[in-house]
Amino acid sequence: MPLPKTLSKSLGRLAAVLALLAAALWLGPTPAAQAAVPLERVSSFGANPGALNMYVYRPAGLPAHPAVVVALHGCTQSAQVYADNSGLTTFADRHGFLLVFAETTSANNANSCFNWFQTTDNRRGQGEAASISQMVAHAQSAYGADAARTYVTGLSAGGGMTAVMLAAYPDVFEAGAVVAGLPYDCTKDTGAFTCMNPGVDRTPAVWAQRVRDAYPSYSGPWPRVAVWHGDNDPTVVPRNADELRDQWTAVHGVDQSPDRTSTIGPNQTRREQYLAADGTVVVELDRVPAIGHGTPVDPGSGPQQCGQTGTANFIDSICSGYWITEFFGLDGSTPSPGGLPAPSGLAASGITDTSISLSWTAVDGAASYAVYRDGARIATPAAASFTDSRLSPGTSHTYSVAARDAAGTEGARSGTVTATTTGGASVACWTTDNYHQVQAGRATTDGSYAYAKGSLQNMGLYNTFVTHTLKESPVGHYVIADGTCP
């Protein structure tokens, strides 16, 4: 097998890449996928120093300003293989979020692994990490994705690169899920193969400092992190799950003793949750019993089932995609209300280009509150107020709140309040044929049909014979406004 073309640049990188080759295959050869998920290739998404490919899965009826989940495949895999087998598209369809599948190739790494171990690819503004951040920016500009609801997950080397993205771009990602991966910057003082097996033990403080060093000027808030790992993983040993837990609990300033433990799924996966002072789960560790190296899936049509097992390293056990979607807050579920009444007086104030402040009347007996933005829970503050920050200018959001008792059980939800951040552009309209709407950057095409950017409304055939009026408000978000645009 030929060595990667980048080996000649650094003897240090040579050792790391050879380690991956010696471990190869992290993921075994991949037979043909059992299903063909329709992916849209994005040929140009901005600067691409890591020479990656970008694919998008856009479910039917995608809402305006959808959440976006970046998915990173494992070694020897591809974007298509990961889309076909991981089960993530099941929940994109169910809950209406955009999936971005980043893909590396054998030109970057002989085994098509993301280069999580190379400083040229795992630092902010460099290589593969920078390319993935550009994909997120493109998803926001081209598809109207909500910058405040951006997440990342990945398997194996993709799990290692997930940890890279959370550390190097904590201002971009709200949360991430590392599946069979490794702590960020493990190879700072050792080799990639040693990190994988037998793993390395560092103090939580040392691990946390490596995350802070990835973006020294950043002071928070930090992404929430879920860790998924098989108990019998011989390739990336389970010690890595513990070290990831140590790294991110220390980043969040909480200790390494779980605040809540439980079992989930049909195979009794052991869940440990680590809570911030306001009750938010900031780190979660899911230990999957009796499986080796791979993504846990559970084929079937049940509400908690997903994925396929006909391809290597997708293991029949538990649908990790279901629980990861829940951890990200994208499932849109409404918990059965407990005994606490709904808060009253919900109001929005102090609105800026990027933040909306909320307040409500305190509920007797409430230990904390759950704040929902656009149907997804985003925070659990202790006080009867909350400021939602890192929003996009000129965007509208609908909020509700529920009181929580000391056990974390939510009561009934309040009424809603809708607020719009400042800074959006005034309404602008354009009337022309679909071909010229696409050429002007107000619409996208899959080669057959045109779609309004932002709303992704189907405008009909991509040609000069179909004409529509598009209204832009806020900037970069277009809707069909035939006969109604001022």
Image: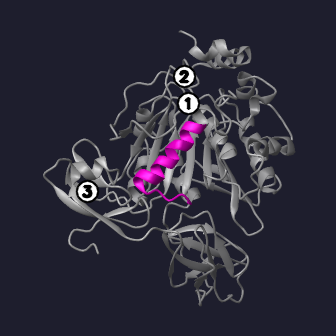
Q: Which residues are magenta?
A: 130-148
The image quadrant that residue 357 belongs to is bottom right
From the top left corner, tell me how far across and down residue 241 is, in percent.
Answer: 71, 40
The tag on residue 480 is: none
> Which residue is under mark 1?
50
Image height of 88 relative to 387, above or below: above
Nearer to us in this view, 450 or 339: 450
| Residue 66 picture location, percent across and down | 45, 59
- Helix, strand or loop for disc 2: loop
Within-10-Å neighbours for mark 3: few <14, some 14–19, many 20+: some
Q: Which residue is mark 3?
A: 458
Lower position in the chain sequence, tag 2 or tag 3: 2
Q: CA distance from mark 1 to mark 2?
A: 8 Å
* Residue 140 lies in the magenta stretch: yes
Circle 1/circle 2 CB separation < 8 Å: yes
Q: Along the horizontal axis of the image, is 435 left or right of 2?
A: left
Residue 108, numbered label: 2
